[in-house]
Structure formats: C-alpha cells, structure tokens
Amino acid sequence: MEKVLITSSTVRQTQDVKELQARFRRHHGVVSRWELRALGIDRAQVATRVERGEWEALPGGLVRSRAVPDCPEQRLEIALRRGGPSAVASHSSAAWLWGMTSAPDVPELSVERSGPARVLGAKVHRPAPPSPRRCERRGFACTDPLRTLVDLAGELGEADLDSLVDTAICSRLVSVPALEAEVGRLGGRGRRGPATLRAALRRRGFSGAPEPSALERRLLFLLASAGIVPLGVEVRAGSSGCYRLDVQLSERVFVEVDGFSFHWSPEQMAHDARRRNDLGMSGLLVLVYSWRDVVGEGSRIIGEVRRALALEAAAG
C-alpha cells in the first residue's frame, strides 16, 4: 500500500479550505479579496475560479460563490460590505430583519455623515446625529426596532405605518413607553419621523388617552346624547362582587372603557380572561371600548348598546 505523507503544509491547506467554506456559509456566499489573500488565495487563483464559473468577481473588491443563489441576505451582505465600517441595515432592511415586513427589493443602509453618499445596489441614508444604536440581528449589523420605526415613519403612508406599529407592539419588539421615549429623544432635529410616529401612536389608540375619569365622562356624555340613561356608574359585579365596572345600563348589561386599546403582559391578559369568564358565567354582558372607540366611533357604540339592551328585553 502506498504511504501518504501528511505534512504541516497539507494540514494548513486543509484548514484554509475549511475556513474559506465556512466564511462563504457565514456570509451568504460573499467574501472579500482581502480575506482570500489571508487564506493564501492569490489573484491568479481567484481569476482561475472566476474563469471556471465557480466564483464571480464583484465591484468593491468582493467575490461571490456561484454555489450560493442570489437572495435578500446576500444582497444585504454585499451592500453592508460596500458601505464601510459604519454601515448598518436600516429602514426597510432593518424592519425585515426584525420580522416586521418582507425583504425589500433594494437593501437600505444608514452610514455616518462622513460615509459614502452612494453604494452600488443599495439605498443609502446619512442621518443627522445622534447616530443609530448598532444591534446585531441574524448576523447583520442593523438599527434597533425603536429607531427602525422612527426612520420608517418619515417615509410610509398611514396604513403601512399603522400596520408596522401594530406588528412591532404585538410581537413585543417594542413597548409603547419605549416608543414614546424614542420619539422624544429624536424629535426636534429636523426629522419627519418622530412627529409622524407620535401621530400614529395616538391614531392607533396606544397613547394620548385621557385619564379614566375623563374617559368615563365622555362615554356618559355620548350615552346621554342618544337618550340612554345608565342605572349607575362605578358598580361592583361578578360572582363575589370583586370586579368594578364603569357603567351599568340595565340589570345585566354593562359598559367598560379602557384608556389603552390592549393589554400586552401575559399576567394582565390572564387576569382579563378570568374576569371575562366570571362575569359571563354570572349572566352579565360587558361591552368594552377603547378611548379611540369613544372618540371616533360613537355611532357604532350607541348601535351596539341599543342592540344589547333590546336582546336583554327580548330574553325577559
């Protein structure tokens, strides 16, 4: 049997090949010529692989493996490398990385004011100070969810922005207090985003609600304008009388108003479920409305209240 001589040079070459393959995998099929040189692959070897169709030479000193298909991750990798050390995925690209939207057709980057004004194959932003906080998501440097929403608020229409805000809050990427703090931190700096996002939060019912007492007064005024006279306010109900309800309309019909459209914490959601179940098993119907409902959908509320009262009367 022929003996195979294993030398330190052979071991080194094997390690370099494995490292090259690992880098291509980690970086979605893209490496720099500098990385190739560090692994002992010179210009002639690169040219040979390009001629054989294994690799593709890209502008900006990059090399792409043709074994890795074109994909949003690869396009973002190329854009970030061309954008320089300060580049981070931002706007629609960051929203995609955080799971708020689908991948954009063209990657979006934010770079420092001294960074490049243009990057081939990408949309570049050079925001005013303060610079975005750098996060890492799915292996990419990107803006955090708070800054991402502020950045996009200056570019999206109302419907798209509202959907994005709902998604971010529902998935617990951000909280309303944190969004309000970010809007305050970045406001007054010549940006459209903070004011637009503040308006979206109010429009979605996530901020700007009046105090509970003021909201109840507004509800009572709405009911009075429709000729509906409550039996009582701030009443106790439930199997043990442990739950406080805002307005009692009849023996079994009640109305509650909530200054916040949704309860997000698991503990609060569990409490709400127990409360709702107890009241339902006690034979009570509780209509629940947010402040946004009271302010903007008064006619719907009145229609539902009248229907509930009619159903109770019909049931005897």
Image (tube, rainbow, N blue to C red):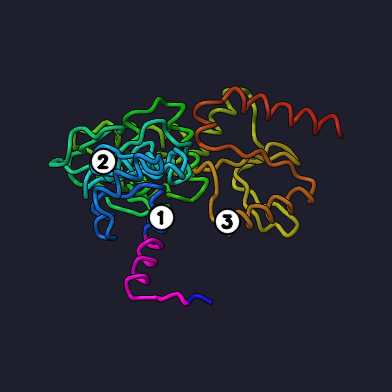
In depth, the one of 202 and 100 nearer the eye is 100
Quadrant in which residue 59 is drawn: top left
Expressed as whole percent of the image width and height from the top left, the position of residue 56 reads 35, 39
Q: Residue at x 16, y 41 (%)?
A: 115
Residue 13 magenta: yes
N-term mark: 2 or 3: 2
Amino acid at the residue labelled 2: Ser
Dot in front, 1 or 3: 1
Expressed as whole percent of the image width and height from the top left, the position of residue 181 reads 31, 48
CA gap between label 2 and label 3 equals: 38 Å
In depth, the one of 68 and 1 nearer the eye is 1
Q: Is residue 144 above or below residue 307?
A: below
Residue ID for mark 2: 110
Amino acid at the residue labelled 1: Arg
Q: Residue at x 35, y 75 (%)?
A: 7
Expressed as whole percent of the image width and height from the top left, the position of residue 120 reads 26, 32
Quadrant of the image for the N terminus? bottom right
Q: Which mark is residue 268?
A: 3
Quadrant of the image for the C terminus? top right
Q: Is residue 179 above or below residue 242?
A: above
Q: Which residues are magenta?
A: 3-19
Q: Which mark is residue 26?
A: 1
Q: Residue at x 41, y 55 (%)?
A: 26
Left or right of 124? Residue 75 is: right
Considering the numbered disc 1 on the image, is that residue within a helix, a strand or a loop?
helix
Quadrant in which residue 52 is drawn: top left
CA gap between label 1 and label 3 equals: 41 Å
Residue furthest to the left: 114
Left or right of 111? Residue 137 is: right
Q: Residues within 10 Å of mark 3 (few under 14, many from 20)?
A: few
